[in-house]
C-alpha cells in the first residue's frame, strides 16, 4: 500500500448535466474508473437519480478494497458535479482526469490531500481544462 492516503476532491463542469437515463452508463463508468486506477471493486457501483427539490441530479458510489469513490451531478445551469476518490493505494491524477473527461467534463478543479494523519496537508491542486 501507499504511504500516502490520497483523497482527490473535484468540482467538474459539463456542457450538459446527465439525466435519469444515465444511471447504467455511470455504473459502468465506475467499473472502468476502478480499473483505470488499478484498484479492485469491493462494493458494486450504485447509482440513483435524486429528485429532491434543489438537489436534483444523479448520484453514484463505488466501494473499492482500499476505500471509495463518489459523485453527484446537479441538474442545473451551470451543469456541474462533485467527485472524490479516496484510497490508501496510490493513484495518478492523469488516470482520474482521463475518466472525468469521459463524462463530458469541459473543466475541473481539484485538490489532493494526504489523509494519512490528522493534518490533511494539500499534496496538489489545480485546474484542468479540456477545451
Image: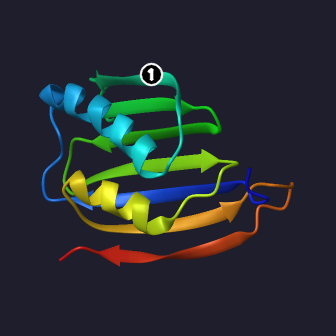
Q: Is residue 104 above or below residue 62?
A: below
- Horizontal arrangement in the rendering, residue 91 relative to residue 33 (left or right): right
Work out which quarter of the rendered image holds the C terminus and state it: bottom left
Residue sticking out furthest to the right: 118
Residue 27, x across and y down, in percent: 31, 29
- Residue 63: image x %, image y %? 54, 29
Rendered image quadrant of residue 67 = top right
In the rendered image, which residue does mark 1 sit on? 44
Can I make out residue 56 in this image? Answer: no
Residue 67 seen? yes
Mark 1 Cα shell of 10 Å, populated few (<14), some (14-19), many (≥20): few
Indicate left or right for 90 with 128 as reference.
right
Q: Observer-nearest residue: 17 or 45? A: 45
Q: Position of residue 56 (x, y in %)?
A: 27, 32
Question: Toward which corner of the image does residue 21 lie, by quadrant?
Answer: top left
At 30% from the left and 39% from the top, the residue drawn is 29
Amino acid at each position: 500500500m501507499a504511504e500516502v492516503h490520497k483523497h482527490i476532491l473535484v468540482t467538474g463542469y459539463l456542457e450538459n448535466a446527465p439525466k435519469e437515463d444515465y444511471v447504467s452508463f455511470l455504473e459502468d463508468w465506475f467499473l472502468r474508473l476502478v480499473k483505470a486506477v488499478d484498484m479492485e471493486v469491493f462494493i458494486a457501483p450504485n447509482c440513483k437519480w435524486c429528485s429532491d427539490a434543489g438537489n436534483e441530479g444523479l448520484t453514484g458510489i463505488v466501494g473499492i478494497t482500499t476505500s471509495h469513490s463518489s459523485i453527484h451531478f446537479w441538474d442545473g445551469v451551470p451543469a456541474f458535479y462533485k467527485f472524490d476518490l479516496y484510497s490508501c493505494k496510490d493513484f495518478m491524477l492523469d488516470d482520474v482526469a482521463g475518466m472525468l473527461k469521459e463524462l463530458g467534463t469541459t473543466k475541473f478543479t481539484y485538490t489532493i490531500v494526504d489523509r494519512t494523519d490528522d493534518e490533511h496537508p494539500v499534496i496538489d491542486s489545480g485546474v484542468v481544462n479540456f477545451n
